Amino acid sequence: MGYLNGLLALWRDRWLRRAIAFGLGLVCALGGQNWLLVQDRPWEVAPVAAQIYRPEDVAEGIYQQIPDLPRENRYLSQETGQVDGESTLISRFIRYHQYVKNRPLGFRLDWQLSLADYLGANERMIAERYPGFKQLQTNPLESDRTAIQALSLQQRRQLVDQLASIYVTPSRQPREVNSDTLQNAPSSPPPRQPQLILPQPGAAGLLLP
């Protein structure tokens, strides 16, 4: 009995080590390149990494792509009493969309719904739940709504397009197929024909009683 228990423990230990090694290898294979890109330019991250990156960094990338967007980052921090330059209009918009409304990140329609909230055409916005209410000395909700309403139609469209492209999910990315890929792809083997087995001489005798 003790011998069997020892074998069982050894098998479990080997299985656990193999599972851990497989998991680490999978993480390195899928996420290693994305993580390096996050460290270099956070707003040009791959989709999986973008979903876990700080809204402030994503917002900074948006401002670089659309520099005429208002920043609205002159609010004083509750903690330090200094201007919190990272709390911008776009970072608060992202936080509202992602954390307050818990809407998907990779679809234009959901970002348009959040814009409609600011425009007063969709769901009512609650001041006590708005990003910055607890962190800033002044609640930026009404000022942010005014700033969003002042954006042109083109600016709103650009903002939605940029956000949806940054947070696009991997399953929605089209796969590129070129002629080289098709030429190098292994051809499917022809279907196997059923083999006809002919009766052997004397086989009928096996059926006699």
Image: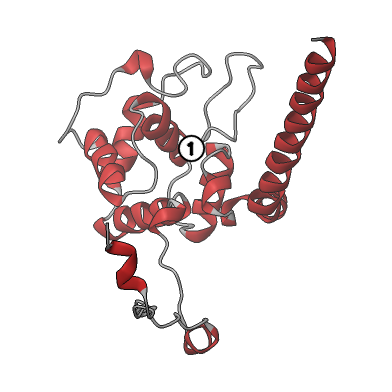
Residue tagged 1: 91
State the residue at coordinates (37%, 17%).
129
On-image quarter of the C terminus: bottom left
State the residue at coordinates (57%, 37%).
54
Q: Position of residue 200 (x, y in %)?
A: 38, 79
Task: Pick out the residue farthest to the top.
Answer: 1
Q: Secondary structure at mark 1?
A: helix
Q: Position of residue 171 (x, y in %)?
A: 41, 54
Q: Position of residue 158 (x, y in %)?
A: 36, 58
Q: Position of residue 208 (x, y in %)?
A: 27, 62
On-image quarter of the N terminus: top right
Answer with the quarter of the image where residue 202 lies: bottom left
Task: Decide: is 204 above or below 46.
Answer: below
The colour scheme is: secondary structure
Of the pair 77 and 7, the residue shown nearer to us: 7
Which residue type does callout 1 highlight? Ser
Answer with the quarter of the image where residue 204 lies: bottom left
Of the pair 67 and 58, the residue shown nearer to us: 58
